Image (spheres, grey):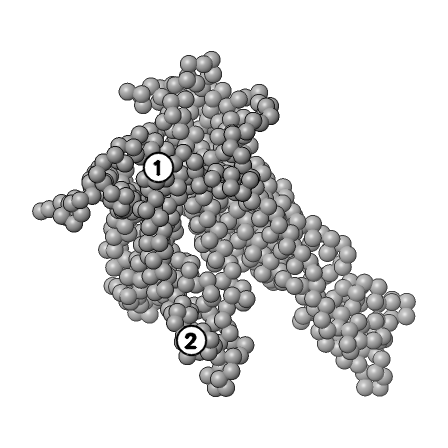
Amino acid sequence: MLGISDYLWRLVPANPILLRVVESGGKRRRDLLIRCIYLGLLIAIVIFSLATSATSISGMSVRDLSNASGSIFRLMSYFQLWLVALLAPIFTAGAITQEKDSQTYDILLSTPLTNGQIVLGSLLSRLFFVIALLISGIPIFSVTQIFGGVAISSIAASFFVAAATAFVTGALAMAIATFKVGTRRTIFSFYLFIAIYLVGGILLDQVDYFKVHLVDPVTGLTGATLSQTSWLTAINPHLAIRAIIDPNNYSPPDPALLPENLRSWPWSWYLSNPTSFYIWFMFFVSFVLVMPSIVLLRRMAQSTVSPKTWLLQKLKISKGDRTRKPRIVWSNPIAWREAKTKASAARASIVRYGFIAAGIIGAIVLVSLYSREDLQGNYISAGSFSPADNTLFISGDKGGTFKVDPATVIKIGESNVGQTALMGRTKVKAFSTTGKRNDVLATLDLEAIPRRVNQDDARQFLLGATIIEFAVILLIVTNAAASTVTREKEDGSLDLLLTTPITSRYYIWGKLRGLVSFVLPLIAVPVISALLFILADSFHLASTNDPSFKWLVFPEAIFILPGMLIVVVAFASILGMQMSLRCRTTVRAVMASVGIMIGICGLLGWCGGQILTSMNRGDNTIGVAIASFSPFTVMTMLIDPEKWAPNTFAPGSSPNDMFTARIMILIVSWIATAGYALAVWTMYKSMVKNFDMTIRRQSR
């Protein structure tokens, strides 16, 4: 039987670069291990989905099996897409730059190979593993056909969306690498872009501004009905997959319901069939991105000036080599180098400070919109009610001065309240006067004054932003830590450091301190965002005395988030350093550390979410305590508890239970932070103890 390499040899006999990487990479134990882990996770998704769907498969009806099949397919499709989005940058970012690091790039350029053979061979060789990983999951996806409820075309479409995402990612990485951008910066930029693009698109998709106003089929006029999909669906892979796996709640509009100016091609294709458009458009973008690399490969290799330097010189921003003022070095130069020189240079300061500025400015804008009241209709403000003569002044179009007597029924929602509710600022939903005297109030329905952005939307955007920010921070620090030792092995500086009086304890502690110091300004972004909302709510509570007041962010978040986020970042740093010490190459260390960190955070977050939603009201304290060990779950409970912990914080829950749960979150979060700190200290001591032996073993 012919192997896969023999088939590829017959298909592409003129491209030895592709076959070299494919044949060498296909036999590695690492690739086999990753495939086994991937398939094991898919199998686990199937088992857990079936286990949580019903008590036993034998007791499930055909409809239940069909619903379970759809749920399994949905989870596996999302998992597959996000896995490709994370693995593709690791495998493709070093397509050209690793050839430069191993000093084989100049040899390739001196061979008769054309630019196209070098670029396409390097690109396809990197994508081979990702595509093979997708193909290996087809048998498990076929399980959904046993129960029904999932069309074969939907499975094929989900695979094509993932493949198109891998190709466009690889083509972009190839273009960046060809134009002389370093491997580590490429990986960081990819992670930052992917996180913002995917999650940001999901959040913006829920805003009505990006929806299309559909035509009323009866009148033929554009009405107030909005499409379920948005303008972002056809360019976001997560939304493109959702359009095929959730047709009941997220279905593209029919072309006949689109406005007249959007019925022509390509807008009708873009809006009515977003999944197909995404697949073809991304493959086209991949082709467009690869072409400059093929045309300019050897020309860029011969150039001594990078495009960025050339552009800055043309704009009179950079004049070439310049002198700089001497910098003050810390007491630990290893830590100073990681925090101030290598780490910051590898990640581009403009991107780093742009991340900080965007996060803070976004939080300020959101707080401003949340704090601004929408004063339409009738309302009362502080001082409008005079207890001395029982008169109330109602501002607005139909307002005026009215008498409030003991028989006046004052309500907020469905609850009867007393005259104390008239002391603050509230909106008058409706009111009526007595028949005898029009200046005496009979009923008065009040509600909170609406804001430009209501509390639910503000929570959703704040939670999404903080999760994106912290996830990006973890990816940044894990990637930096995973390359911190292997980078020095590759350039030979580690051998020089080992000849100095620097000890392993001094070296490892300096690396850890420098990495944490580097991301401290980034950690401040989600903390400051939460603090702004706490201050806004505190001011609102002090100025209005609103009896129906609810915190958007629990105030104890300011005591929980800083310590937990810093310690979790330290844990990610020490984990990446451990992989960097054990692995011989940067790509392998980055892939291992990022995979482990994603697995730990994903498992803790998934378990915490399942516990919060499945626990009964009597066991809510236990569920909250267990969920507090996951940093992402803690963020969901502090910012949006009603949605993510409904059995504890939903409207109608006991105030005593909610207060107990909040105290439990505070205490257990501190315990979890201490546990993460203990894990960091244990791993640090282990690295110090085994440092010399590990370095000697790898030098053989």
Above or below, comparing residue 544 to residue 91 in the picture: below
Between 688 and 53, the one lying in front of the other is 688
Give the mark nearer the N terminus: 2 vs 1: 2
Image quadrant where residue 329 sits: top right
Secondary structure under the numbered disc 1 in the rendered image: helix
Above or below, comparing residue 584 to residue 170 in the picture: above
Q: Nearer the viewer, mark 2 or mark 1?
A: 1
Query: Mark 1 highlights which residue?
Result: 301
* Residue 606 x %, y %: 44, 50
* Residue 517 x %, y %: 55, 32
Q: Amino acid at mark 1?
A: Ala
Report crowding for label 2: few under 14, some 14 to 19, many 20 or more residues within 10 A (C-alpha). Answer: some
Quadrant where the C terminus sits is top left
Between 410 and 250, the one lying in front of the other is 250
Q: Name the disc covering residue 324, or none.
A: none
Residue 53 visible from this viewpoint: no
Query: Mark 2 highlights which residue?
Result: 263
Going 48% across and 38% down the picture, which residue do you hit? 309
Secondary structure under the numbered disc 2 in the rendered image: loop
Report crowding for label 1: few under 14, some 14 to 19, many 20 or more residues within 10 A (C-alpha). Answer: some
Relative side of 287 to 197, left or right:
left
Between 83 and 310, the one lying in front of the other is 310
